[in-house]
Amino acid sequence: MAKRPSGRAVAGILLLDKPIGITSNHALQRVKRLFYAAKAGHTGSLDPLATGLLPLCLGYATKFSTFLLDADKHYRVRVRLGETTTTADAEGEVLATASTAGITESAVRSALTQFTGAIEQLPPMYSAVKYHGERLYKLARAGQEVERTPRTIHIYQLDLLAVDLPDIELDVHCSKGTYVRTLAEDIGKVLGCGGHVAALRRTGVGPYLEMGDTPTQFITMTELETISQRDEPPAARYSALDALLLPLDTVLGHCPAVKLSADAAFYLRQGQSVLIPQAPTDGLVRLYDPSGHFIGIGDILDDGKVQPRRLL
């Protein structure tokens, strides 16, 4: 007999503002416990050194986590020039030092031009990339360094915010799979002095942005724990926590919405493609039943029909 999962069947997306010093999995488990959720998952880990947005999917929202895993990311990073470390961030041991006396703002701006657009990036040894089934960071901790294959990533925007040597501050908009630690290290190499990440904050994932025209509120662990410790019945505390969750359709809020007839909704739920009048001609669409309830994501096929991609 299958074991019934313990916890509530709560569903939604929590935009957690991860605190410094804990792993993404530690943050996930704490949130899962606070919500007493039966199921939860994160959408791309943040290093313990990093703070900022860690979207967590609770319940059947985990079905849509891949859309956030594949989404663009935004970071605010402080790079310490003149020091190279074993991990390319402040948690590693210093391997080499160099003077930053001759580095000007003009030189930094010139160096940054080499890191926009499609670039090749070598995954760091201290990363979760697998080599023959083993995580690279485990090999690195054992003192091993193995050959890695460069990956093509995209830096859509790289803005210099401040120069206060030996530190510079950058705003980064990049594709999935980008290692900001490697970016910092490579910028230091171009400047001839080395560098590493001194501080890192993730400010956006996909449609969720801390700054911009329509900023999104991130929820801190302190806020969650304060609610969970209220002197009131558990049902009231859980209701207050659940109110912080975003609906699933916000994941792809930029995609057109399509309202289905009862028949179309029925056949889509059976896995069949359907023709919907006045639907977009390509791309992804958000699907809603006749009552306006979100039921999933669909693809527009070449023949104009809508094919279910991921349904609740």
Image (cartoon, helix red, strand yellow):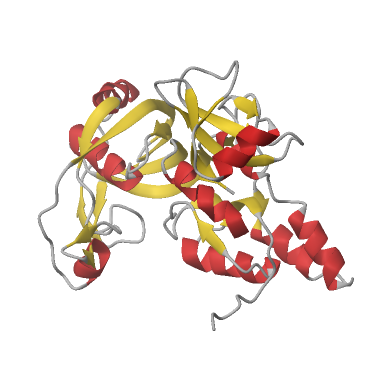
Q: Which residue is at the front of the view, 239 or 194?
A: 239
Give the farthest residue toward the bottom: 1
Q: Is residue 131 above or below residue 252?
A: below
Q: Is residue 285 left or right of residue 50?
A: right
Q: Is residue 8 left or right of residue 128?
A: right
In the rendered picture of this protein, how many numbered marks are placed on residues? 0
x and y percentages locating residue 174 in the rendered image: 38, 34
Q: Which residue is at the front of the view, 226 or 128?
A: 128
Residue 288 seen in the figure: no
Give the farthest residue toward the right: 232
x and y percentages locating residue 291 in the rendered image: 77, 36
> Residue at image x 27%, y 21%?
110
x and y percentages locating residue 51 in the rendered image: 52, 52
Q: Is residue 288 left or right of residue 23?
A: right
Q: Which residue is at the front of the view, 89 or 51?
A: 51
Q: Is residue 74 above or below residue 55?
A: above
> Residue at image x 50%, y 49%?
65
> Residue at image x 36%, y 56%?
90
Give the farthest residue toward the left: 147
Q: Is residue 5 above or below residue 250?
A: below
The quarter of the picture where residue 137 lies is bottom left
> Residue at image x 20%, y 45%?
98
Q: Is residue 71 above or below residue 221?
A: above
User: The N terminus is located in which quarter?
Assistant: bottom right
Residue 19 seen in the figure: yes
